[in-house]
Image: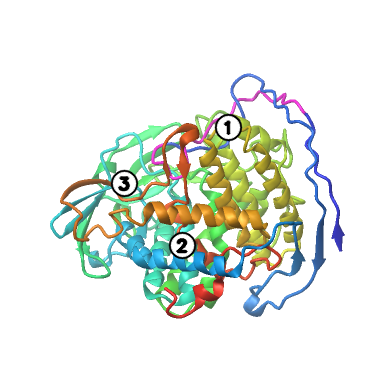
Amino acid sequence: MRIERRRRLATWRTLVALGLLACGGPSGSEGTDSGADLGADTPTEAVVADADAGPETAVEIGADATPDGLPDGLPFSYSRPDDAPPIPDAEVQAFTRKVLGFLSQVRYFDYVLYTTHGVDASTGKPDWQFWYNERFRRDGDLVTFYHPENPNDGGHNLHIPLSRVLSAVLAAWLVTDDATAGLAAEKLCKGMSASMQGMVHGAADPLPHLMARNVVPAWNHEFLTHDGKRKAVDTSGWWSPYTRWNCERFLYEDNPSWGPVWVTSLRSKDDVPYIFRLVPVLRYAAAKGPEGATRTACADALSLLEAFAKDIVDQGFRIRTKDALGKPFTPGYTDDVQANNKWGDISSFTWWDVVIPQSECNARRGAELIAYHSPVSQDCGRGEPNKYDELSFISNGYNKHICRYFHVAHLANALVNGDAAALALLDGLDERVAIDEGLAATQQHYSSADYERDLVLFLVQAHAYGFPLKAAEARRIQALYGKAIDELAAWPYWDPWAEGVPDGELGGYRPPSCKGEGEQQECWFGVDALAQVFETCWSPFVNPAGARWVDCELVRAPGAR
């Protein structure tokens, strides 16, 4: 079968003047969300020049076996025209050895275990670890990870890096059976679960699957790491209530799992596409991983995430939360003093569909596929950008990330569920990438380096789910991945207990991903993306028609690390 298409972006005017909320700041920020803000209180005009960006795309339908109900490959062939020569095998191998050598040198999986925290098993309570982004200090052989006092903020958007890291360590465990990667996957799967189980208000609470922005225990503790080092966790900086337009923090005294916990409520949709994209690898881990604690923890997290998605679908594609008394409500809709004002859009996939019917369709249908393993009511066609995508980006730059990742998450879950829409979604993703490439020179929200880094990271994460790379794109991936290694190999805190790490306050325990400012800024892949090679080499959906950037035989080879 052949699909021939021409893409045309028509010039059009925005007449919507409804005034949206914004969810807040940059990915991984600990204070503001970024969110879907289509505009201010006055009409906005959006003009996009006519453009043809339409090389034809050839598609042939095929069929692969699906043992255990999970596909073992793409069910079709799909290619994108590419006139550039492929990267020579010797260069791909050299790059792969560079990445594997770096991950071994810095002991990346140990670093993940060192710097994530939550509750240790030595407390006698269910253990878990989560990807916070706070501060640490050293006092001799004791390293304390602590949350600075923050009475009005803290801990937003953390499921974005958590989802990326968890996907990578799960894939590393599945590909290599590395014990440290498996332990990190176990602890972080439990951390994903804790972000839901921690917002359980007493033993009678019937909703263990509604997700908080973050949860921290209302007590501190010291314990030994997986390799016998003294570690302490101090979350007391977040032991205070606050109320903001986009969330609240309050104490649940009688959580059934952990006793007193501080909860930051109102899971916004900023993190959800990254969580949704994680689900396919969780499904393979739960079904095919070696028997043991990691497989069990990931199966538990998967079950809760499927219930989370089902709740979204069953509540009209809205994300419910709970108040300080444990009462569930739908922000912007149910018993909400800010109804139809601010909260509604932050946790809804339908806020704009009356004006733009296809707005956020990828989010809605992706939720259906996770919840029910098949579509229920939504038809997104190719999932390509529509007026909502373009308007929301004009208003708030971070909406570009949300729309991109809901698309690839929809595609990923369509593939893992054998959904025939995957083919059209892949074709729509090709259009999305072309549009985003075209915006690089004109967009005003990010520096050139920041925009390029995020787009290239999106390319490599889409590649794991069927998107065939062009040779130039593969080289861009290698360039930014390689720059991350060059910039971060000498970063001093991969092991906070290492000789040479001084006593005292040490600042943040996450290395930087940019340096400089404005047009002089340089960026590279962040710490949460440094093990991407494992997800790429695990995925059964990598498209053989695309350019190769990593040698997966080397990644899988015993002793290569």
Relative to 441, 519 lies left or right: left
Secondary structure under the numbered disc 2 in the rendered image: loop
The residue that mark 1 highlights is: 37
Q: Earlier in the sequence, mark 1 or mark 3?
A: 1
Q: What's the distance in space between the residues labelled 3 and 2, CA to CA?
A: 21 Å
Residue 456 located left or right of residue 415 = left
Q: Which residues are magenta?
A: 12-31
Looking at this view, is 280 or 264 the one in front? 280
Nearest to viewer (mark 3 / mark 2): 2
Name the amino acid type tagged 3: Glu
For label 1, count other residues whose C-alpha is less than 10 Å away and answer few (under 14), some (14-19) or many (20+).
Answer: many
Alpha-carbon neighbours of circle 2 within 10 Å: few (<14), some, or many (≥20)?
many
Residue at image mark 3: 134
Is-magenta flag for residue 301?
Answer: no
Q: Look at the numbered disc 3 and give the secondary structure of its residue.
A: loop
Q: Nearer the viewer, mark 1 or mark 2?
A: 2
